[in-house]
Amino acid sequence: MFPGQLYKTESGRLFHAGAIGIILVGLPARGKTAISRSLSRYLRWLGVQTKVFSVGNYRRQIVGVEITNDFFSPANKATADMRTKIANACLDDMVQWFAEGGQVGILDGSNATEERRQELVERFKACNVHPMFIETICDNPDIVDANIRSVKVSSPDYVGWDRADAVEDFKRRIENHVPFYTTINDLSLSFVKVINAGERIVVNNAQGFLQSKIVYFLTNLHISRRKIFFARNGVSLNEQSYRADAPLAPAGHRYAENLKNFLLQLRENYALSSPTTTATQESPRQLTVWTSSRKRSFQTAAHFLDHEEIIVRQRSILAERHPGVCDQMSPQEIQEKYPDECQRATNDPYRHRFPRAESYYDLANRLEKVILELEREKNDVLIVAHESVIRCLYGYLHGLPEAEIPSLEIPQEVLLELTPTAYAIEERRHKIPDAVASVNWQQQAANFISLAGNVPASPVYTSQYPDSSSSSSPTSLTPASSFATSPRLSGQLKELTDAF
Ligand code: ATP
């Protein structure tokens, strides 16, 4: 049965079942896969059942990776038929997935011709799925070149290839697509054109709640490299009470000072070790500190105010999860007083809310604005917050299933460093040293980076987003070694913390 009415998602949210088939359009190396994955991660975070269907993965599964560029040549009739078969196999699976209740399917392929796009429109409309196109156009050769070098040469298609040969081969692949690629001109269609990595956005005929969300999300995306740091608040004079909103304890101030010194030194070391010339040279990034208006958060972040060039922004939506009736109670007291509620919390830790409290789900909804700002931000950001807030934001960035979020361990006195890349998030963890032991800051921060080879010395953990189960990549097609699917993040967290 195809959707067409209100129904409940697995997570219990009500959605109008006007399913959307998102169709990517564009030449190779224009960011179609990167956009598909980021969008999928965001929609899943909103609770929308979303899945990416990658034509490239179907090609690799059906014909393998040992193909010549002749395969993509429009003049080659035999491979043209094969390419159509592959694209249709992917499309058939997507249509089947809609029939099983999927809400937003994302077709990641070049869909370069008007004719193909018309076929897709008809196929989707026949099963009550609204087609929406996202075309990514890029005529900046520096961006295309950087894209090829940063991700294409390490794709499964080029395992074992010489790097320079792979770059040339990929450029020929693009050339093969150029003669039959046309931009979308049909104004009756719903489409968004993302031009030169977000320099300009053109929106046509986007309707409804979910499509507006998708458009707004796309306007926030960019490809600048930046880092997102997370650190917990310092300890306060009354850790037990939310209502008291107590100021930082002396130990909390010491921690805040240590955090500031360590992070500034770490950034300085990164700046020293970064390459001076790249195709898309970026200027040094500023640091902005985001914190809540809760005293212990703000007072931790306030230590950065000594530095004029660092902006500290206070945001009330970054406040910790409200504990409701559990305020000032120990876990044991809560268990004794509310055994039934505790059982419900165990059964559904993400959605359960104690009386007058916020659930993680409530908190996540409150944080959606922060997530969009994080996507938009081009500078480095440090978020100083309570563990519950960091869990939610960290869970989003890594594309974790919601059930894992409440039990993530975000240790005190650890600085998390997350670097978004095209398809994944890289993570490093740093133990914030204790200044009482009269620390040599430069040495401590340098321990994590080898200045010599520009190679990070601390372990880097990579998680693909969204998690691999959400993509239509068959297991035999797990993408390139450089984007190795990580073990489950929760397992990693322990490993990372134990590494200290
Ligand atoms: P292919 O058709 O070969 O699958 P693709 O269009 O899917 O190529 P991606 O694999 O997504 O291209 O390319 C990833 C690269 O594109 C990354 O370097 C990423 O930074 C960059 N990128 C992401 N978004 C955009 C965009 N809107 N415009 C141009 N490049 C982008």
Image (tube, rainbow, N blue to C red):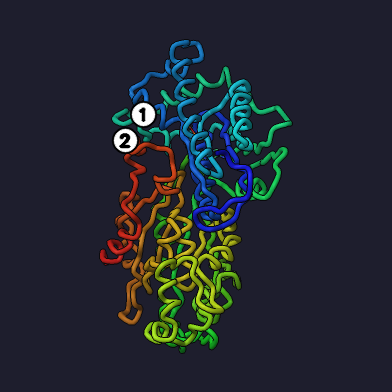
Say what amino acid the circle numbered 2 marks: Ser
Q: Mark 1 belongs to which amino acid?
A: Gln
Q: Nearer the viewer, residue 392 or 230?
A: 392
Q: Residues within 10 Å of mark 1 (few under 14, many from 20)?
A: some
Q: What residue is shown at x 35% (from left), y 33% (from top)?
A: 156
Task: In the displayed orientation, state which residue is furthest to the left.
Answer: 499
Q: Residue at x 42, y 15 (%)?
A: 70
Image coordinates for residue 331, horizontal then vertical, percent: 39, 82
* Res 272 visible: yes
Estimate how packed mark 2 is, as few (under 14), some (14 to 19) or many (20 or more) residues with alpha carbons within 10 Å: few
Residues tagged 1 and 2 counted as in contact (Cβ below 8 A): yes
With respect to residue 259, does 117 lie above or below? Answer: above
Q: Is residue 256 visible?
A: no
- The residue labelled by disc 2 is 476
Residue 295, percent from left and from top: 54, 82
> For the residue labelled by badge 1, is the local secondary structure a helix, a strand or a loop?
helix
Distance from label 1 to label 2 (Cα)? 8 Å
Give the residue at mark 1. Answer: 61
Numbered tag placed on residue 384 in the rendering: none
Q: Quadrant of the C terminus?
A: bottom left
